[in-house]
Amino acid sequence: MSSAISDVLARIRSLEDELEEEFAARRARFRYRVERHRVIFEESVRRQHAALRAHLWPYIRRARPMVVITAPAIYAVIVPLVLLDLFVTLYQGTCFPVYGIARVPRRNYIVLDRHHLAYLNGLEKLNCAYCGYANGLIAYTREIAARTEQYWCPIKHAQRVSGVHGRYPRFSEYGDAESYHYDLARLRDALCREKERL
């Protein structure tokens, strides 16, 4: 990997650290902490949140009719999402040990914690759980696919690709036939070292 790409990746990591510091400052501002995956609000904040909750029936009555009509289409997507979850989890559980790839910890991606927010009514909590599951599942699936790509075909595309995963910048350059087999071995070895660190 070129030093220019390494420098950009280092700046990205630095910005991610800075972003996490900002998130920590906001957690302090909203007076909560996370202990062993559990969110704990100060008692006064919990009371304030409960007072701000929108009651369920007025909330539903205020909804636009087209929102209510399209809701079943949104909720129906849970079926393919659960199937995707099942299949990618089975895939990595079966294949990753064979390839020597570290398993992707599902709990790091699928986080369901918004139901602890007292200012959300039951329907809002359900919607937040659904979105947290769906987006977490897509991120979990993407990381499984990214590790698979790093193992089998770590080559950049000739054309620009929107929203590439974090492993992509380290892939072999498109058309670099001389370095490909070296890069393939290097990137597979990196996956095995990740397993050793877990």
Image (cartoon, rainbow, N blue to C red):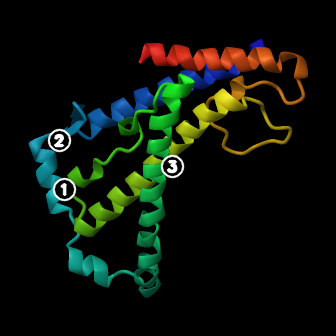
Q: Is residue 154 left or right of residue 61?
A: right
Distance CA(mark 3)–CA(mark 1): 27 Å
Q: Earlier in the sequence, mark 2 or mark 1?
A: 2
For disc 3, the marked residue is 138
Residue 65 is drawn in which quadrant? bottom left
The reply to whether residue 1 is in sight is no
Spatial separation of the CA atoms under disc 2 and disc 1 = 10 Å
User: If you read the primary sequence from the N terminus, does the residue marked by circle 3 or circle 2 appear first?
Assistant: 2
User: Does any portion of residue 191 appear in the rendered image?
Assistant: yes
Front residue of this view, candidates 20 and 38: 38
| Residue 30 position (above or below residue 11) | below
Of 25 and 13, which appears nearest the observer? Answer: 13
Specify the amino acid type for callout 2.
Answer: Phe
Of marks 3 and 1, the one in the foreground: 3
Q: Nearer the viewer, mark 3 or mark 2?
A: 3
Q: Residue at x 39, y 35 (%)?
A: 108
Residue 67 position in % (x across, y down)? 44, 79
Pointers 2 and 1 in contact (C-beta within 8 Å): yes
Task: Describe residue 175's horizontal placement relative to residue 86 as left or right.
Answer: right
Callout 1 secondary element: loop
Q: In this figure, which residue is indicated by the disc labeled 2? A: 41
Query: Which residue lies at the image location 49% right of the left edge and 45% below the top edge?
Result: 88
Q: Which residue is mark 1?
A: 118
On the picture, is 45 further left or further right than 154?
A: left
Residue 140 spot, x, y in % from top left: 48, 42
What is the number of callouts on the image?
A: 3
Amino acid on which the number 3 mark rests in the picture: Ile
